[in-house]
Amino acid sequence: MSKKNKQARFAENRVLPNVFQPTREEAVAGYKLKGKWREQVFKNTNPIVLELGCGKGEYSVGLAKAFPEKNFIGVDIKGARFWFGAKEAYESNLTNAVFLRTQIELIDGFFEENEVDEIWITFPDPQIKYRRTKHRMTHPEFLERYKKILKKDGIMHLKTDSEFLHGYTIGLLQGQGLEILTAHHDIYGAPEYEPNTPLLRDIQTHYEQLFSAKGKTITYIKFKIH
């Protein structure tokens, strides 16, 4: 992406009404919308679903179109990427999809306890090297952050092409005695992949399309952390 295009997207993000770009200081202090997303942003009492590391926002937008009775927030630090999703949501008049630019490790500065109903993690960097362990988005320290904001019966989803991250996460969840609702090593190869997770195969991110085209299997875990 050229620097000019990136700057143009940054500029548009600043005026799109469905994009929120707080400072790190605002997150650390407790963001002004913490506990107020339903009331002040969505103007309803519907469930809140986060997509962490949303990339171009395909999942957030796809789910928002399919489930108007839920509120979706795509979260990523790279605003030039999620500009695609924010732009599509705005032009499609999707009032139940917004985007938040921040680092995932600050996520509990944006949401109150029990404010979030569901969290999707879609194709994160697996951070395979040992020294990068703490950066894995299903590392125990991240799970503790999610636990702070997720309702007691809230659901977590991990969709990834990384067999390493899939196996690491299953082992971690089992080791901590957390509830795995379902786990699939190949969602496209299993005839009964996950009937209770609608559109699991129907909505594909940019990276999922790339990985699938290369013949990589796509894995999925649905679990609880309370």
Image (cartoon, grey):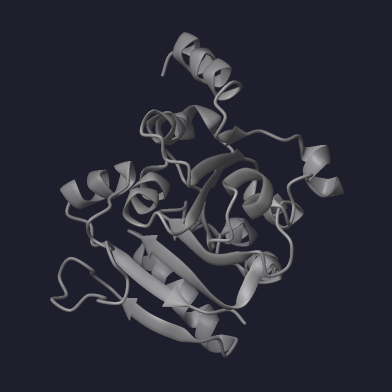
Identify the residue at image location x=32%, y=58%.
Answer: 161
Looking at the picture, how far across and down is residue 8, in whole percent? 50, 13
Quarter of the picture holding the C terminus: bottom right
State whether residue 201 is above or below residue 76.
Answer: below
Looking at the picture, how far across and down is residue 130, in whole percent? 57, 61
Residue 219, located in which quarter of the rendered image?
bottom left
Q: Is residue 49 left or right of residue 182?
A: right
Identify the residue at image location x=53%, y=63%.
Answer: 47
Identify the residue at image location x=72%, y=58%.
Answer: 108
- Decide which of 201, 39 is in the foreground and name it: 39
Let me know if residue 52 appears in the view. Answer: no
Q: Is residue 152 left or right of residue 3?
A: right
Let me know if residue 212 appears in the view. Answer: yes
- Decide which of 214, 53 is in the foreground and name it: 53
Question: How many numbered dots are placed on residues in this image?
Answer: 0
- Decide which of 15, 128 is in the foreground and name it: 15
Looking at the picture, how far across and down is residue 20, in whole percent? 63, 35
State whether residue 152 is above or below residue 77.
Answer: below
Identify the residue at image location x=35%, y=78%.
Answer: 183
